[in-house]
Image (cartoon, rainbow, N blue to C red):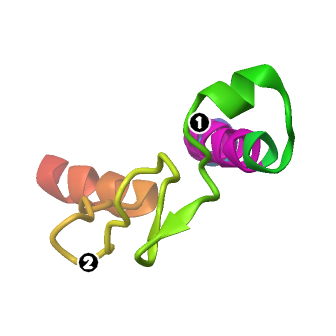
Amino acid sequence: VYNEFQLLDNFYKRYNKVLLDKVAIEKQKGSLEKENMFFKSLLKQYLDGVSVNNDVMNSSNPLLVVNNKVNLNRPPVQKLDATNQKPLIEGNMEITNINMQIK
């Protein structure tokens, strides 16, 4: 009976690891999609700045630099520091903590 539980325990360990990896990949995918949209927007502004057509000529040119100021529409740069980061708890550590509380 113990051997069966050990095999089941190993299965759930592997399953949980895969599940954690899947969640991490989905989270990273969302972040990369957001970053991709940002770069597509910057690329569109750049291409609008270098192309010549009526729509571009009637709007402000994003590549025009006046007094060292660029007219690109982009969000301000944010520094990543320890205050912006959320604490992370590894799954194995959480399971260990739960097992310690049960005993």
In depth, the one of 18 and 63 nearer the eye is 63
Type of amino acid at the residue the image marks with label 2 = Asp
51, 99: nearer the viewer = 51
Q: Residues within 10 Å of mark 1 (few under 14, many from 20)?
A: few
Q: Which residue is mark 1?
A: 30
Task: Find the magenta span and give its range.
Answer: 18-46
Which residue: 56% across, 44% down? 31
Specify the principal SS of the magenta part.
Answer: helix
34 drawn magenta: yes
Residue 28 visible, this orientation: yes
Q: Residue at x 59, y 36 (%)?
A: 30
Residues marked 2 and 1 touching at CB (< 8 Å):
no
Element class at badge 2: loop
Q: Position of residue 56 (x, y in %)?
A: 72, 31
- From the image, tell me which residue sits under label 2: 81
Residue 27 appears left or right of 84: right
Q: Quadrant of residue 48?
A: top right
Q: Does residue 22 appear in this view?
A: no
Q: Earlier in the sequence, mark 2 or mark 1?
A: 1
How far apart are labels 2 and 1 at the CA level?
21 Å
